[in-house]
Amino acid sequence: MTGRIQDLAAEHASHVLAQALPAAIAQATTELTALLAKAIVAEATRAQGETGLCAYAITRTHDWDPAAMPDLHAAAPPRLITRNGLGLVATDVSLSLFSGLEAKTSEDSPLATLAREHDAVVRAVFERAPVLPLRFGTIVAGEQAAHQLLDTRHNELLERLALVAGHREWGVRVRYEPPAEEPVEGLSGTDYLRMRQQTLAGGTEVTQAAKSLHTKLSQHASDVTCHDDTVLDAAYLVAVEQEDAFRTEAAALTAHLVDLGATVHATGPWPPYSFTRLELAVSG
Amino acid sequence: MTNALADVLDRVIGRGAVITGDVIITLAGIDLVRLDLRLLLIAVEDVLP
């Protein structure tokens, strides 16, 4: 018996090995990438000195009210660095604040605190002037770098600010989980097919209703962005004077989708986070 | 109204203008912070409702 097992093992060893190798390489790549990224960030934090300018948003030069800024747990309140009509909202931070952040999504995690602070700063500015929110964790080298950024893309930034002025962003996400399938056992073939058809029809109806919601909401919006990963994950840039019409329409159409069994998650108002589709490459 | 944390993370980490180039603190051409964030975003996407 033992001999037979040994024979089998010998016979399949190369095959098993061939399968295990790519799996091992993939696993090692994933684990080492994460470790290496952490190490590089730690090294960079050391190598680049201790501080940088954490930038939150680009805005127009305006009557800056420091008292309107939220308190930050590990930095001075943000200031406005101005240049030819444009301003960068930023504060000095210790770079170590941003290294080693983990994607723990509990409210008291360092990432959650920093992300909420970022949002609070952007909103505080947004309430007084048009803003182009910057991606969380944008650290520029210093005031000179800030000036360089505002100089290089001066006209484009002013144009973008004009586009989002007087607007707020609203998000709508629609999901649909087909009802859990009944146990197939005991169902006749005909019943099973009917059940499958009902499930598929429900999905189609939701998709159509979501499409119609999107079309109607888009008519009240100046700009729209969409992610494709769900039935609908859209952001609408809505002019303040269109908000009532937009929200009334959204409420009615949402009710219809909920009746069809879909989940609708509406958020807002937001600063125009989804409408600053720009990558600002700045070289000296 | 307080927004759900997942919605805030989606907006502030996943969207907003990206700055690249000399003005950003980088090492070997990789944005110091964004390097970390790419990993974060992947993890955060997994927990979005």
Image (cartoon, coloured by chain):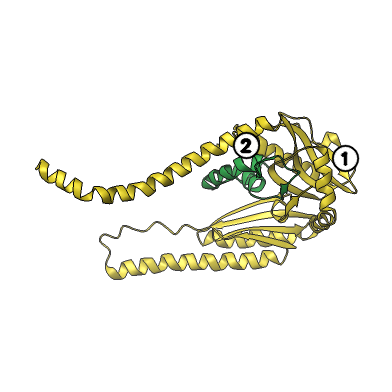
Instruction: Please tell me in which quadrant of the rendered image residue A252 appears.
Output: bottom right
Structural distance between the alpha carbons of marks 2 and 1: 27 Å
Instruction: Please tell me in which quadrant of the rendered image residue A94 appears.
Output: top right
- Residue at horizontal 75%, vertical 42%? A56
- Taking the view exactly as shown, the residue that stands out farthest to the left is A1
Q: Is residue A138 above or below residue A187?
A: above
Q: Using a 10 Å C-alpha cutoff, classify the residue at mark 1 as few (fewer than 14 neighbours), some (14 to 19) or many (20 or more).
A: some
Q: Which chain is yellow?
A: A
User: Element under label 1?
Assistant: loop
Q: Position of residue A120 (x, y in %)?
A: 73, 40
Amino acid type, residue under disc 2 in the picture: Ala
Q: Determine which of the numbered discs, if any, sits on residue A106 in the image.
A: none
Q: Chain of mark 2?
A: A
- Taking the view exactly as shown, the residue that stands out farthest to the bottom is A190
User: Element under label 2?
Assistant: helix
Residue hosting label 1: A64
Chain B hue?
A: green
Q: Is residue B22 above or below residue A262?
A: above
- The front one of A101 and A241 is A101
The quadrant the N terminus of chain A occupies is top left
Count of numbered labels shown in the rendering:
2
- Residue at horizontal 47%, vertical 40%? A31
Residue hosting label 2: A112
Judge whether residue A236 can be spotted in this image.
Answer: yes
- The front one of A137 and B26 is B26
Q: Position of residue B26 (x, y in %)?
A: 68, 41
